[in-house]
């Protein structure tokens, strides 16, 4: 099995996580949190919802034995699988 195929298989988990984020799990949490935090002030609730942001950081370590070109390709596969799938 090639390194690229192994990397693609490993990258499925972050892709699923990002798809869950896109499907609205965190968006629903933000809405529920805003309602509970600002139950009586609609203006503050709207300000919070308009400024709330969702972020994700992925830290990935690759073996030093990989050639630089292979490591770069794996990083690009990760980027494409998360942000363009």
Image: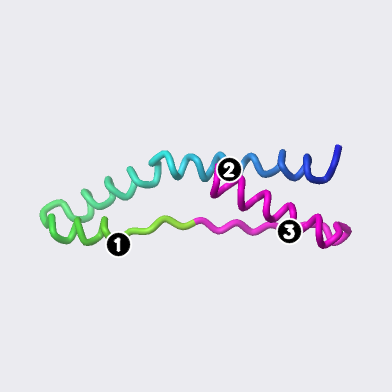
Of all residues, the one furthest to the left in this rendering is 40
- Residue tagged 3: 61
Q: Residues within 10 Å of mark 2 (few under 14, many from 20)?
A: some
Question: Does the stretch in magenta take in 4?
Answer: no
Q: Position of residue 81 (x, y in %)?
A: 61, 45
Q: Position of residue 50 (x, y in %)?
A: 26, 58
Which residue is at 40% across, 41% downward?
A: 25
Magenta highlight range: 56-85
Q: Are marks 3 and 2 in contact (CB under 8 Å)?
A: no
Disc on res. 1? none
- Residue tagged 1: 51
First-in-chain label (2 vs 1): 2
Which residue is at 81% across, 59% downward?
A: 69
- Residue tagged 2: 15
Task: Kindly report the distance in space between the C-alpha atoms of the residues bearing marks 3 and 2.
Answer: 17 Å
Q: Residues within 10 Å of mark 1 (few under 14, many from 20)?
A: few
Q: How is the image coloured?
A: rainbow
């Amino acid at each position: 099995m090639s390194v690229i195929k192994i990397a693609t298989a490993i990258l499925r988990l972050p892709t699923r996580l990002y798809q869950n984020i896109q499907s609205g799990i965190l968006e629903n949490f933000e809405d529920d949190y805003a309602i509970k935090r600002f139950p009586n002030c609609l203006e503050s609730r709207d300000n919070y919802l308009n400024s709330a942001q969702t972020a994700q950081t992925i830290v990935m370590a690759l073996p030093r034995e990989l050639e630089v070109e292979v490591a770069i390709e794996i990083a690009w596969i990760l980027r494409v699988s998360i942000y363009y799938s």
